Amino acid sequence: MTSAFHSIVQEKLLDFYEQGVPDVFPRDVSLGTPSVPARSNLVTVLVGVRRCGKTYRLYQEIRRILNDRHDLRSILYFNFDDERLKPYDTAILEDVVETYYAMNPRAKSEGAFFFFDEIQEIPDWGTFLRRMVDTQAVTIYVTGSSSKMLSSQIASEFRGRALSREIFPMSFSEFARFHGYGADPLDEMCDADGVTSEARAKCKHALGRYLVEGGFIAAQGLEPSDATQLLQEYANRTVNYDVMERYNVSNPRAAALFLARSLASSARELSITKTHNDFKSRQISVGRETLSQLLSYYEESYLLFAVKSHSVALADNARSSAKVYAADPALFGAFSPAPASDGGQRLETAVFNKLLRERPSMRAGAISRAFVGQGSQRHEIDFVVGDALALETVKLVQVSVQLANPATRKREARALESAMAQFGVEEAWVVTMDDEEELQTPAGTIRIVPAWKWL
């Protein structure tokens, strides 16, 4: 089936074969062993915020397949994130595959690897891919910028025929490797007494950079003002394409202002009611329900994540007041009104991002916050990592920039001791910039760990 964009389809396919596969920085996200092309293979789905590296992760997988002695012509790669292809129409999917087979007729019988980048905006993409799985000897990889590809759409369209992988901006360990600090500085530079002073210095320096520069690869090495501009463009482009267009949002000014407010609130509580009242006082017309919906859209687009109170309630509607976390420390910094004095927010954001990577595709609420104690002894626990619905608690994590102040140290220890008793665990963590020790309490062990080691 020839689409209205047939000439563009041909051009993009030819460009791929003429330009080849670019060299890319290898990411740590594993996609498993590539399946030999065959009917009924599982589809691999990668989702994450725009520009976090999904395309480059596909290139990494293509290089892996080529290194396994497959020919470049056995690979179909097509990126649908191209304004020339709008308005999107289902016919373009058939056109891409038919044009590929016309260029590479042997692939029809010998099998092929299909890589479809940012496919989520094409109507009926799931139905089309399911037909490819059922009828063609192919191995399919798909990327998208919406968490819906992990849940409702995947479940309904593929019915157990897809494996989902989340991809985020670079982790701290990837950042250190990207900038030449070593594949794993701690492993490389340890002696009989533990971490050497050289390793400690390198890791601390890398952490300081990471909390400012973040993990978006294209922003690495840029001047701070240029990096800020680029990350703001990433976020605003995501809202334009993945929120306003997809959901027909009719108030773009409110959506942009609320996005800036939300990202600048990373590691802080974001109250929908307070935000609504503030916007109202500034003559910004937007309803509370609209703000709540916008927050859920930002989450679906992987720009930020809401962390609610730990609860076993199935109908926990705490979105009106939850702590939010940006998808990357630098993404928060790009919207922060005080970037020079927000080290605590950057650190807590990085800790949350690490916890999120450790439990990909988790059930909602698997990372939560908690309040323990009563009255003046009531304390907040930053992260309770575990599935509340399954009555499972895996980890208690507190974040504090430093514990030099005895009152701060006592407060954090008392909070975690109370939480360990409440949740029935015998170990908890405080992540700091550089403090390190172990505290023994009646409830269990509190491990104070420097962030450069914990990350």
Image (cartoon, grey):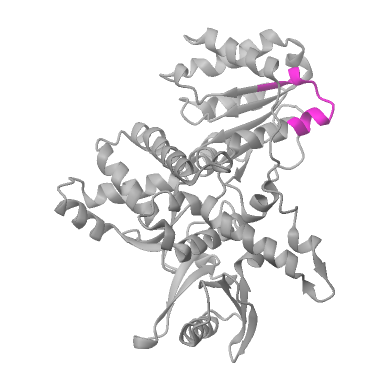
Q: Residue at 61% across / 52% down in the picture?
A: 171
**Is 190 left, or right, of 327 in this rendering?**
right
For this orientation, the residue located farthest to the front is: 223
Place of residue 330 in the rendered image (x, y in percent of width and height, measured from the top left): 49, 51
Q: Residue at 77% across / 40% down in the picture?
A: 33
**Is 62 left, or right, of 220 in this rendering?**
right
**Is 140 left, or right, of 348 in this rendering?**
right
Q: Is residue 190 magenta?
A: no
For this orientation, the residue located farthest to the bottom is: 442
**Is 438 left, or right, of 235 in this rendering?**
right
Q: Quadrant of residue 206?
A: bottom right
On the question of residue 88 being in view, the answer is yes
- Relative depth, front residue between 422 and 307: 307
- Relative depth, front residue between 281 and 243: 281
Vertically, is 49 above or below 123?
below
Q: Which residues are magenta?
A: 63-76
Query: Where, quadrant-wise, is the N terminus in this rendering?
Result: top right
Q: Is residue 68 magenta?
A: yes
Place of residue 54 in the rendered image (x, y in percent of width and height, measured from the top left): 59, 37
Q: Residue at 68% across / 12% down in the picture?
A: 101
- Relative depth, front residue between 319 and 304: 304
Place of residue 29 in the rendered image (x, y in percent of width and height, measured from the top left): 67, 46
Place of residue 9 in the rendered image (x, y in percent of width and height, measured from the top left): 56, 13
On the question of residue 28 being in view, the answer is no
Q: How many tags in the picture?
A: 0
Vertically, is 192 above or below 9?
below
Vertically, is 148 above or below 182?
above
Query: Where, quadrant-wise, is the C terminus in this rendering?
Result: bottom right
- Relative depth, front residue between 207 and 317: 207
